[in-house]
Amino acid sequence: HYEDIVRGYQYQKGDYVILVDEDFKRANVKKTKSIEIVDFVDEHEIDPIYYEKPYYLEPAKGADKAYVLLRESLKKSKKVGIAHFVLHNREHMAVIKPHD
């Protein structure tokens, strides 16, 4: 019967985590045009092996002042931003740093 079927993920041989509808709802990312910065760290704290593909940021209409403030703050503090964003319906992590 359909109601007897469960969805799960095998995390090691013979051991499974059972997933319910609520898990899938929480995992569903909402597409926005924003980038959420969650932390600031020294660039050397991030191993370059994790870098995949560079993207260039530019401010959305009306966000010029906030963009310049972020860029100048990153330069002065010599930090990079750790951010989350949604691209192609998948959430990604990114490093944000000024580029001259």
Image (tube, grey):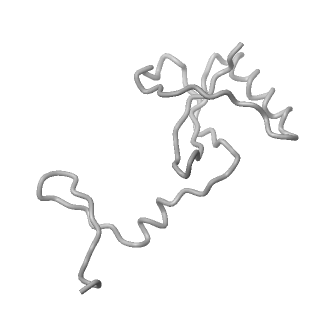
The residue depicted at 75 percent of the width and 31 percent of the height is 58
> In the rendering, at what x and y percent does residue 87 appear?
58, 45
The residue depicted at 52 percent of the width and 47 percent of the height is 91
**Above-or-below relation of 89 to 69:** below
On the rendered image, what quadrant is the C terminus found in?
top right
The residue depicted at 61 percent of the width and 21 percent of the height is 79
Of 34 and 79, the residue lying toward us: 34
**Above-or-below relation of 77 to 35:** above
Q: Residue furthest left?
A: 14
> In the rendering, at what x and y percent does residue 86 appear?
58, 47
Of 44 and 95, the residue lying toward us: 95
Which quarter of the picture shows residue 55?
Answer: top right
> In the rendering, at what x and y percent does residue 49 appear?
40, 22
On the rendered image, what quadrant is the N terminus found in?
bottom left
Q: How many marks?
A: 0
Give the left or right position of residue 100, taking residue 3 as reference: right
Give the left or right position of residue 12, taking residue 3 as reference: left
Which quarter of the picture shows residue 80?
Answer: top right
The residue depicted at 80 percent of the width and 39 percent of the height is 60
> In the rendering, at what x and y percent does residue 62 appear?
88, 40
**Above-or-below relation of 27 to 62:** below
Give the left or right position of residue 67, taking residue 48 as reference: right
Q: Residue furthest top?
A: 100
